[in-house]
Amino acid sequence: MTSSQPVLEAQRYVLPNAMPVAAERLSLLAQIFDPASTDALLRTGIGQGWSCWEVGAGIGSVASWMADRVGPTGRVLATDLDPRYAAALTCATLEVRRHDVVKEPPPAEQFDLVHTRLLLCHLGEREEVLDRLIAALKPGGWLVVEDFDSLSITADSRANPFETPLKCLAALREFFARSGLDLRLGRRLAGLLRSRGLTGVYSEGRIFMACDGTTFSRFQRLTLDQVREGLLSENLVTAEELERDLEALETHFLSPSPVLWSASGRKR
């Protein structure tokens, strides 16, 4: 879905960690997508003694996994604009810092591995930030970037009569587009890495059929809860339609998930 409306505000972040539902939403996100992320990270050969930077750490689940992989001789730096959840992690080789990857210079250290998931799509300066992440790598270091393609595959009852196109999810995509998100960034990642001279570029998309009453439907509900006021104020959906669709997520929902693309490349 491509928005025909102007961006409402210069790249506002519409899913802040400070909102009451954010902790549960981030926890569910980790449950759903950490397996894809760890598979992508394993392809880099991450091991003992590596120095890693996790950008946009969220609840810190991927950073904790990396800390286990690099062992006592390695180091993981986890940063976030609002690190309130990752800050609770306790590990001798894991450091958590507040960091604005758009406005502040990257850490002075150089890393064997830099990873970020579902961050760049929110940033108007996404390509500049991508360049900063590459600059933070040691020669031979790996970058792993993951993001959604939310447009290529959506619910289509013509293709499968059991699929459930919900108006609130179409409204959510429109709201994100108006807020400046790149809803197809995941699909573009491999090209962006190749254009920057990274070698061994590999990209893999992961998608599944989501259904009612599952972890993913709960994740979708919490996402809608976070942006409810925006959806209603922009007249993208009515309160009645939103409540009807929230019930459907629990009772009769079937739809492809967004495609999570995991792209990796190595600095020369």
Image (cartoon, grey):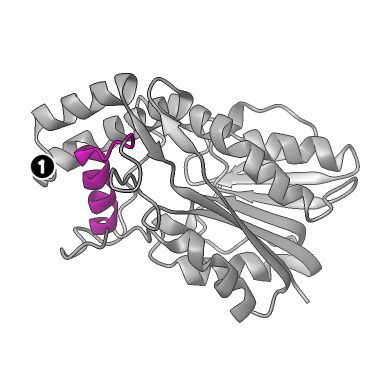
x and y percentages locating residue 198 in the rendered image:
70, 74
x and y percentages locating residue 40 in the rendered image:
70, 50
Q: At x 44% / y 47%, what residue is drawn?
A: 258
Of residues 78 and 207, the one nearer the viewer is: 207
The residue under label 1 is 233
Q: Hey, which quadrant is residue 69 in on the image?
A: top right
Identify the amino acid type marked 1.
Ser
Q: How many labels were placed on the picture? A: 1
Type of secondary structure dominating the magenta stretch:
helix
Q: At x 78% / y 53%, what residue is drawn?
A: 43
Q: At x 52% / y 45%, what residue is drawn?
A: 207
Q: Does the magenta stretch include residue 171?
A: yes
Q: Is residue 13 magenta?
A: no
x and y percentages locating residue 192 in the rendered image:
56, 73
Of residues 163 and 207, the one nearer the viewer is: 163
**Is 216 left or right of 199, judged from the image as shown?**
left
Q: At x 55% / y 66%, what residue is drawn?
A: 189
Quadrant occupied by the C terminus = bottom right
x and y percentages locating residue 236 in the rendered image:
13, 45
What stretch of residues is rendered in magenta?
162-179
**Is 15 left or right of 200, judged from the image as shown?**
left
